[in-house]
Amino acid sequence: MRILVCGGAGFIGSHTCTVLAERGHELVIADSFVNSSPRVEGRLEAILGHAPACHRVDLLDRGAVAALFACERFDAVIHFAALKAVGESCERPLDYFDNNIAGTIHLLQAMRAAGVGRLVFSSSATVYGDPDTVPVCEDAALRVSNPYGRSKLVMEQLIGDLCTYDPGFQAVNLRYFNPVGAHPSGLIGEDPGGIPGNLMPYICQVAVGRRERLEVFGGDWPTVDGTGVRDYIHVMDLARAHADALDFLFRERRSATVNLGTGRGTSVLQLVRAFGRASGREIPHRIVARRAGDVAEVYADPSLARSLLGWQAELDIDAMCRDAWRWQSMNPDGYGDEPAAGTAAHATASRRVPDQVSEAIAGG
Ligand code: UD1
């Protein structure tokens, strides 16, 4: 099939591209590169033996999105393109609503105009907020606690309404738990701009010497060792789930919302120790106050993904740490782009960068 991958140069998008290509799909990447590196293209070429088609398109540019669908034919779309920093979303909620929600509306409009009715959407376990019980099932209460989470929930709801009222439209919402790790080649991986907000990239930067020590947010949580427990999932397992979700859409022609996690919780200190084993380096750390908005323990009930998609996670914490470390040690400065992208302000500033890849689309 011919698949449009919006946000295909980002962390999860780029890994998904490798799996889709290996399964014989033809890919077209659309990415604004406001929070990802153009160097991903060359890395994908090195992994795949050919470069996937890649267009610089910002979903906020309605005309460019429409032009993309006018120039190219797609069987389905996978939509990763969104801003995702929780703290930044609290400082700039309107940028998050605009970029994530308006961008998604433009994409959905272009899909419907072109008669493309299959979508796999990147959602997040953030829609569960602080769940009442673990493991978390898909029918748990939805309660978001920040504008980033709100934007994910609203996008799910907009897509859900289309699925309900448009018989020609089906979507799978994938609620990711905590994606970590990297492609086994070490050529692509997670490269957050600025100071990492998430645990694994922070540990990687401590291990490689870019940061002095990890601050562990809270040692008094009601968990196995007092530190926060999460469901870390290898990005290659996650990537495979997207290909399985596409198969589900074409096989069953119905919509679904599924959790993607391992079903196992790992504490901060357990992850620090696993990373130490994988890297052979000590990870200096100290326990500090809890982070505002954090919760004690969140992990998935992934059984629906197994029954609907035939998918389950295969890679364990040691594999996640080994592959994250391979990427970080081979690329101590990530993709080495200048300057670190990833803020909404940066997104606004670079939105109208001319598209060298596809003049037709830039011309609208
Ligand atoms: C975060 C996001 C969430 C997003 C998810 C996956 C917040 C509040 N939530 O969740 O919306 O869906 O990532 O990308 O940011 N920790 C430390 N020190 C650090 C960083 C983290 O101790 O420097 C701890 C946290 O307290 C937590 C665990 O590590 O217990 C995981 O944190 P993180 O990687 O930020 O993920 P989440 O909090 O699950």
Image: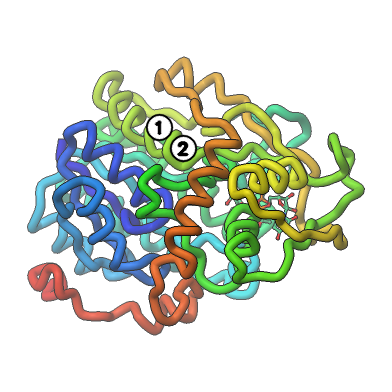
Determine contact: label 1, label 2, CB under 8 Å. Answer: yes
* Category of crowding for the residue at label 2, using alpha-carbon neighbours closer than 10 angstroms: few (below 14), some (14–19), many (at least 20): many
Quarter of the rendering containing residue 102: bottom left
Tell me the SS state at disc 1. Answer: helix
Q: Judge left or right: residue 57 versus residue 313.
A: left
Residue 174, disc = 2
Tell me the SS state at disc 2. Answer: strand
Task: Find disc 1 in the rendering and name its residue.
Answer: 241
Q: Which residue is at the front of the view, 330 or 47? A: 330
| Circle 1 or circle 2, nearest the eye | 1
* Category of crowding for the residue at label 1, using alpha-carbon neighbours closer than 10 angstroms: few (below 14), some (14–19), many (at least 20): many
Residue 287, disc = none
Q: Residue furthest top?
A: 307
On the image, the x and y values in percent for residue 331 come to 43, 63
Residue 116 sits above or below residue 261 on the image: below
- Tell me if the residue at label 2 has its CB under 8 Å from ligand 1: no
Color encoding of the figure: rainbow
Q: Judge left or right: residue 349 versus residue 233.
A: left
Residue positioned 25% across, 66% down in the render: 57
Q: Which residue is at the front of the view, 333 or 39? A: 333
Q: Judge left or right: residue 287 versus residue 143.
A: right
Say which amino acid is labelled 1.
Ala
Say which amino acid is labelled 2.
Leu
On the image, the x and y values in percent for residue 263 come to 62, 27
Q: Which residue is at the front of the view, 300 or 316? A: 316
Quarter of the rendering containing residue 125: top right
Q: Is residue 158 at all visible to an observer of this figure?
A: no
Looking at the image, tell me whether mark 1 or mark 2 is earlier in sequence order.
Answer: 2
Q: Residue furthest bottom?
A: 349
Residue positioned 48% across, 71% down in the render: 342
